């Protein structure tokens, strides 16, 4: 190949590489943020209490205005967790204590939080409402 052809080929490869790099940067988004996701509104995957009926069908519920994320109860002493739940008009039901299942109510109640307790500390949130 002549020197001119090599130079043209090198320029075209360089141009293609730059175009790919610019495209990749545009797709990934160049910003100076820390990479942490910034969310708006409530976490839709959170188990919240209390729940209220939506009025849009049978057994459809949404978080009440004073609802809180029950994950806040994790690692709390049971008495402290009960107090926090009560401030939101919710009640804690211990469904498993120190690896032993406990009898629990079977009715649907959107103000009940079912938890596991280990050595007096809330270790797991089983659910809210008893089947919601």
Image (cartoon, helix red, strand yellow):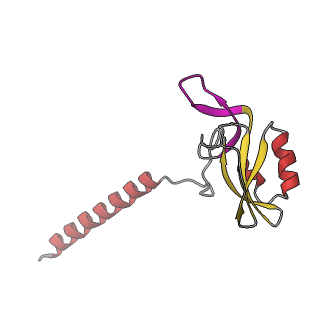
Residue placed at 37% from the left, 54% from the top? 23
In the image, taking residue 62 as reference, residue 120 lies left or right, namely right
Considering every residue shown, the one lying at the far top of the view is 55
User: In the picture, which quadrant includes the C terminus?
Assistant: top right
User: In the picture, which quadrant includes the N terminus?
Assistant: bottom left
Residue placed at 42% from the left, 52% from the top? 27
Above or below for 118 versus 22: below
Asked whether 55 falls inside the magenta stretch, the response is yes
Asked whether 18 falls inside the magenta stretch, the response is no
- In the image, the segment drawn in magenta is 47-64
Above or below for 67 versus 11: above
Which quadrant of the structure image shows residue 33?
Answer: bottom right
Which quadrant of the structure image shows residue 10?
Answer: bottom left
Judging depth in this view, the residue of 13 and 46 nearest the camera is 46
Instruction: Residue 93: give x, y in percent of width and height.
Output: 76, 49
Which quadrant of the structure image shows residue 112?
Answer: top right
Residue placed at 81% from the left, 36% from the top? 89
Residue 36 visible: yes
Considering every residue shown, the one lying at the far left of the view is 1
Instruction: Residue 84: give x, y in percent of width and height.
Output: 84, 46
């Amino acid at each position: 190949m002549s020197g001119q052809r090599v130079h043209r080929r090198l320029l075209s490869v360089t141009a293609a590489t730059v175009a790919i790099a610019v495209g990749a940067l545009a797709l990934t988004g160049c910003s100076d943020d820390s990479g942490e996701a910034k969310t708006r509104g409530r976490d839709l995957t959170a188990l919240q209490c209390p729940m209220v009926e939506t009025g849009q069908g049978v057994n459809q519920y949404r978080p009440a205005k004073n609802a809180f994320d029950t994950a806040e109860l994790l690692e709390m002493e049971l008495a402290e967790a009960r107090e926090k739940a009560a401030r939101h008009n919710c009640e804690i039901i211990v469904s498993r204590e120190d690896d032993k299942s406990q009898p629990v109510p079977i009715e649907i109640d959107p103000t009940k939080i079912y938890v596991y307790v280990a050595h007096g500390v809330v270790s797991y949130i089983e659910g809210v409402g008893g089947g919601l």
